Amino acid sequence: MKLLTKNTDYAIRALIELTVHKEEYLSARSIANKQKMPFQFLRSIMQELIKYKIVSSKEGVKGGLKLIADPAKIKIVDIIRIFQGEIELSDCMFQQKICENRKTCVLRKEIKRIEKLVENEFGKLTVKGLVKKISKQEKGGK
């Protein structure tokens, strides 16, 4: 089971890179190279972030991509929702049919509880917070 898809992971890593360089435009290629991700894949991810007005793009020699949203307000849970939809650990389906025990299933109730916990934890994380953690790590802190 994967909690985060590559799209979500790459989007978060790109946003971290844009936050570190928030005063300048970066090319998608430079972000892809720095974060070791496929350039073409990143371009489609950036289009989604532009659509949601998190990132802007500018054509030309001094153009590229720039973070326009406040990194302190970009919650990781929102990035997950953009690229994956709501956090769901189980869809309660069997052979394309909704499970008959869905309403009374004890396991489903526990799964829903855990999903809410995961959602709340990702809701506490912001891009700015992750950048601070990276900076602290690089300085030798915990």
Image (cartoon, rainbow, N blue to C red):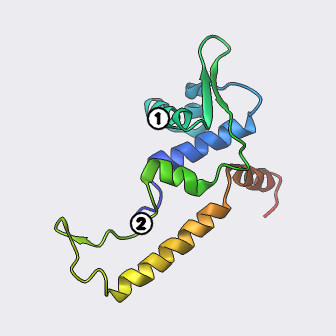
Q: Is residue 72 left or right of residue 4?
A: right
Q: Considering depth in this image, is 48 or 137 the residue closer to the camera?
A: 48
- Other residues around mark 2 within 10 Å, as few (<14) / some (14–19) / many (≥20): some
Q: Residue at x 60, y 32 (%)?
A: 31
Q: Earlier in the sequence, mark 1 or mark 2?
A: 1
Secondary structure state at the residue bearing disc 1: loop
Q: Residue at x 55, y 66 (%)?
A: 119
Residue 59 in the image: x percent, y percent? 59, 15
Extreme residue in the front direction: 103
Q: Residue at x 51, y 38 (%)?
A: 37
Q: Which mark is residue 124?
A: none
Q: Amino acid at mark 1?
A: Pro
Residue 24 in the image: x percent, y percent? 74, 26
- Other residues around mark 1 within 10 Å, as few (<14) / some (14–19) / many (≥20): some
Q: Which mark is residue 38?
A: 1
Q: Residue under label 2, please give it.
A: 88
Extreme residue in the top direction: 61
**Location of residue 30 by image quarter:** top right
The quadrant of the image that shows the N terminus is: bottom left
Q: Is residue 11 left or right of residue 91?
A: right
Q: Residue at x 77, y 29 (%)?
A: 23
Q: Amino acid at mark 2?
A: Glu
The correct choice, above or below, for 72 with respect to 29 in the image is below
Residue 69 in the image: x percent, y percent? 68, 39
Q: Marks 1/2: CA distance?
A: 27 Å
The correct choice, above or below, for 12 with respect to 58 in the image is below
